[in-house]
Amino acid sequence: MSSALTDLFPYPIVQAPMAGGVSVPRLAAAVCEAGGLGFLAAGYKTADGVYQEIKQLRSLTARPFGVNLFMPQPEYAERGAVEVYAHQLAGEAAWYEAELGDPDSGRDDGYDAKLAVLLDNPVPVVSFHFGVPSAEVLESLRRAGTFTLVTATTAEEARAVERAGADAVIVQGVEAGGHQGTHRDNPENDRSGIGLLALIAQVREAVNLPVVAAGGLMRGSQIAAVLAAGASAAQLGTAFLVTPESGAHAVHKQALTNPLFVRTELTRAFSGRPARGLVNRFLREHGPYAPAAYPEVHHLTSPLRKAAAKAGDAQGMALWAGQGHRLARELPAGQLVEVLVSELAAARTALSEFPAGAGGAA
Ligand SMILES: Cc1cc2nc3c(=O)[nH]c(=O)nc-3n(C[C@H](O)[C@H](O)[C@H](O)COP(=O)(O)O)c2cc1C
């Protein structure tokens, strides 16, 4: 870890930003107080909403924290595809007694206004998802004293992150819950993605930046593995999603360990961009033909997802989850950090005892 980031928080554990009301200030504060790095998610929020959340978080902890921004998306090519998808979702709208949302409700997520908030009221760490900010933006954040991170899902993307001048790269494996932070969504994308350990090795050979590893990490032993592979810290989403402090819907939390949901898949069904969620009815029925049109599809399905959540119907909600979801533990967030840290220490001790600890010849 670069000294600037290590100095910020004692344990190599980052609570992933989770948009959609999951990584609320009380969750971030609990993680920060326990010695990890808590994060707020600015995605889908207004600039004022972000400002208010930062204020609230500051009232809960004096420790360093992060704020995550979504990069604005380029115009997608096939406008007709969203209209076709809207027709295909008509039955869902009738079932949930909801209107489909307006796909054109906005495509830049208020990026400039949120950035202005973060430059006027600098925070310790800012991360970016869905692309690379300009070198000027990264430089102005650095001048404000902010440490910058950008997600990459391939070695090529990590090179772009380094060229732009970010302080570190978040390496997101295909195991990760929620949206893949792919820089440019490609309609031809086969949704395959690269596994985290393979990706860390590739990124470490491609760039000279500290790495924060994300995707499927639920236990301290896995954190030990990514640190051994060269990461400086681990970013966990699904593990924190089930904590009592998380703002996730109770139905979402319960579904993660419900034996009804055994698989996750990358899907465009809910938002138009590949994101990993539990395979439920909506994902199964609409995933196969949902168009590559983010955030239009996100806006289109928003009232359906809200209606399903209100009805407590897990089969119609976006149940974002990483591949490790069945290992989720419903512990208070601070306690989860403590357990992860002790598991990490135990795994490191076991490794240091190798080969005797591995049962090798004495
Ligand atoms: C519910 C949910 C919402 C997420 N929202 C965001 C987000 O707003 N910004 C972001 O950079 N990553 C987001 N992610 C992805 C995480 O940063 C991280 O890559 C992922 O959680 C790691 O995989 P894991 O869930 O298996 O730990 C989200 C993940 C989940 C599960």
Image (spheres, rainbow, N blue to C red):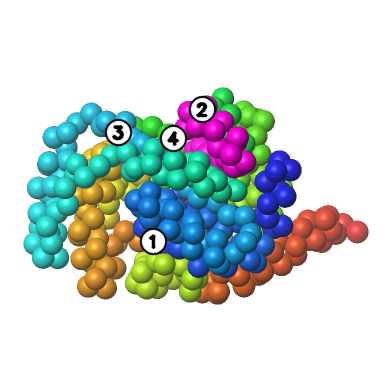
36 with respect to 181 (left or right): right
Confirm if mark 4 falls within 8 A of ligand 1.
Answer: no
Q: Residue at x 45, y 45 (%)?
A: 117
Name the residue furthest top: 163
**Secondary structure under the numbered disc 3 in the rendered image:** loop
In primary-sequence order, the first of circles 3 and 1 is 1
Q: Which residues are magenta?
A: 129-156
Q: Quick one: which residue is furthest to the front in this view?
A: 120
Asked if the magenta segment contains residue 136, the reply would be yes
Q: Nearer the viewer, mark 2 or mark 3?
A: 2
Residue 309: image quadrant is bottom left
The CA span between labels 1 and 4 is 22 Å
The answer to if 266 sits in the magenta stretch is no
Disc ID at residue 136: 2
In the rendering, at what x and y percent does residue 219 appear?
A: 61, 62
Residue pointed to by mark 4 = 131
Q: Which residue is mark 3?
A: 187
In the displayed structure, would residue 222 be above or below residue 295?
below
Residue 93: percent from the left, percent from the top? 12, 59
